[in-house]
C-alpha cells in the first residue's frame, strides 16, 4: 500500500482534498476518491475517525487559509483605495485598521434611569402582583469612561 508523505494512503489523501473541495460533503469526497457509491458515506465517516486523517485534513485547511490570506489582504487594500463607493472604502479601511489593532473604542452614553416592572398576568395571587407593582426595578445607567 503506497503512502503519501503525510502517512495517508493515496485514497485517504484524495479523500481529504476532495472533502475540502466539496465543502465537507463526505459522500461526494469519498466517491471522488474512488470508493463505490454504496460504501462512500460509511467509509468516509470511518476515515474521519482516524487521527492521522483528521490531522492531515487540519493541515490541509490551514495551508489553504494561509495561501488565501495574501489574496484577501490585497482585496481589502484594493477596496480601500479603488472602490467606487466611499462607504465601501471607509469600511475596508476600518477593517485594515481593526486587524492591525487600531479598533475604535466603544462609546457609552448616559441614558438616565430606566424603570422595569413585571406583569406576569396572574391575577389569582393579588398580594404578589401588588408587591411587584409597588416595587418596580430601577436601573441607573451611567456613562462609563474608560
Image: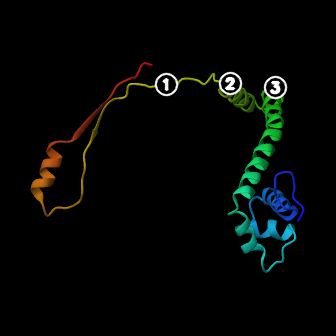
Q: Earlier in the sequence, mark 2 or mark 3?
A: 3
Q: Which residue is mark 1?
A: 107
Q: Residues within 10 Å of mark 1 (few under 14, many from 20)?
A: few
Q: Earlier in the sequence, mark 3 or mark 1?
A: 3
Identify which residue is drawn at 71% across, 69% down. 46
In this rendering, does residue 84 appear at all? no
Instruction: Work out which quarter of the rendered image holds the C terminus and state it.
Output: top left
Splitting the image into 4 quarters, where does residue 18 fall? bottom right
Q: Secondary structure at mark 2?
A: loop
Near-viewer residue (18 or 114): 18
Disc 3 to disc 1, C-alpha distance: 28 Å
Residue 4 percent location from the top left of the image: 87, 55
23, above or below 33, in the image: above
Q: How is the image coloured?
A: rainbow
Splitting the image into 4 quarters, where does residue 79 fall? top right
Disc 2 to disc 3, C-alpha distance: 17 Å
| Foreground tag (2 vs 3) | 2
43, above or below 93, in the image: below
Left-right relation of 20 to 112 = right
Q: Are marks 2 and 3 in contact (CB under 8 Å)?
A: no
Q: Residues within 10 Å of mark 3 (few under 14, many from 20)?
A: some
Q: Which residue is mark 3?
A: 81
Q: Secondary structure at mark 3?
A: helix
Numbered mark located on residue 100 in the image: 2
Left-right relation of 40 to 113 = right
Residue 38 percent location from the top left of the image: 79, 80
3, above or below 100, in the image: below
In this rendering, does residue 71 appear at all? yes
Q: What residue occupies the far left of the structure in this picture?
A: 127
Q: Are marks 1 and 2 in contact (CB under 8 Å)?
A: no
Amino acid at each position: 500500500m503506497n503512502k503519501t508523505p503525510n502517512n495517508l494512503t493515496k485514497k485517504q489523501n484524495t479523500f481529504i482534498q476532495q472533502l475540502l473541495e466539496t465543502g465537507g460533503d463526505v459522500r461526494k469526497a469519498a466517491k471522488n476518491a474512488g470508493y463505490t457509491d454504496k460504501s462512500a458515506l460509511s467509509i468516509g465517516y470511518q476515515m474521519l475517525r482516524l487521527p492521522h486523517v483528521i490531522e492531515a485534513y487540519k493541515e490541509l485547511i490551514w495551508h489553504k487559509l494561509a495561501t488565501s490570506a495574501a489574496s484577501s489582504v490585497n482585496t481589502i487594500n484594493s477596496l480601500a483605495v479603488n472602490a467606487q463607493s466611499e462607504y465601501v472604502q471607509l469600511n475596508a479601511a476600518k477593517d485594515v485598521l481593526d486587524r492591525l489593532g487600531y479598533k475604535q473604542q466603544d462609546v457609552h452614553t448616559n441614558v438616565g434611569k430606566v424603570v422595569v416592572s413585571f406583569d406576569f398576568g396572574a391575577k389569582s395571587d393579588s398580594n404578589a402582583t401588588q408587591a411587584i407593582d409597588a416595587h418596580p426595578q430601577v436601573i441607573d445607567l451611567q456613562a462609563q469612561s474608560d
